[in-house]
Image (cartoon, rainbow, N blue to C red):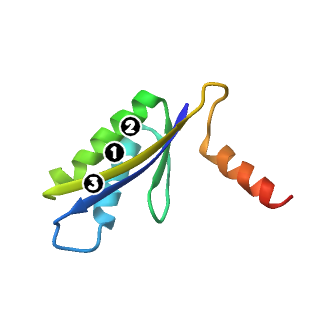
Amino acid sequence: MAIMEIVVIPLGTGSPSVSTYVADCVKVLKDMGLKFQVTAMGTIVEGSLDELLEAARRMHRVPFERGAPRVVTSMRIDERVDKELHIEEKVKSVVEKLNE
């Protein structure tokens, strides 16, 4: 299991607002049945490495399908082989340390 943070930025759309593009990108994750968490600055996704890379590919294509002439996508992947990663567990670990 791996966790990916992804940010898809459409450029040249004529508007500073990107929320409709973000919503359409998140629909990709819903359609794929992946667990995700939308944040103010990106989206966190949980799945196998193959699933995450496929999701990133599909999400990157969404703004082009909606007419954007340019798309910049950034992603980070955290994968461990010694134990499974889960979104909630990573957050819980930090919160516990804050409360010590």
Q: CA distance from mark 2 to mark 1?
A: 6 Å
Question: As shown in the figure, which amino acid type bears the numbered disc 1?
Answer: Val
Question: As shown in the figure, which amino acid type bears the numbered disc 3?
Answer: Val
Residue shown at the point (42%, 36%) measured from the top left: 52
Comparing labels 1 and 3, the label whose residue is closer to the camera: 3
Query: Left or right: 83 with respect to 31?
Result: right
Query: Left or right: 60 with respect to 1?
Result: left
Name the residue carrying label 1. Answer: 28
Name the residue carrying label 3. Answer: 72
Q: Do callouts 3 and 2 mark residues in contact (Cβ within 8 Å)?
A: no
Residue shown at the point (53%, 34%) measured from the top left: 2
Q: Earlier in the sequence, mark 1 or mark 3?
A: 1
Name the residue carrying label 2. Answer: 32
Residue shown at the point (27%, 54%) measured from the top left: 72
Q: State the image quarter where residue 58 is shown.
A: top left
Q: Residues within 10 Å of mark 3 (few under 14, many from 20)?
A: few
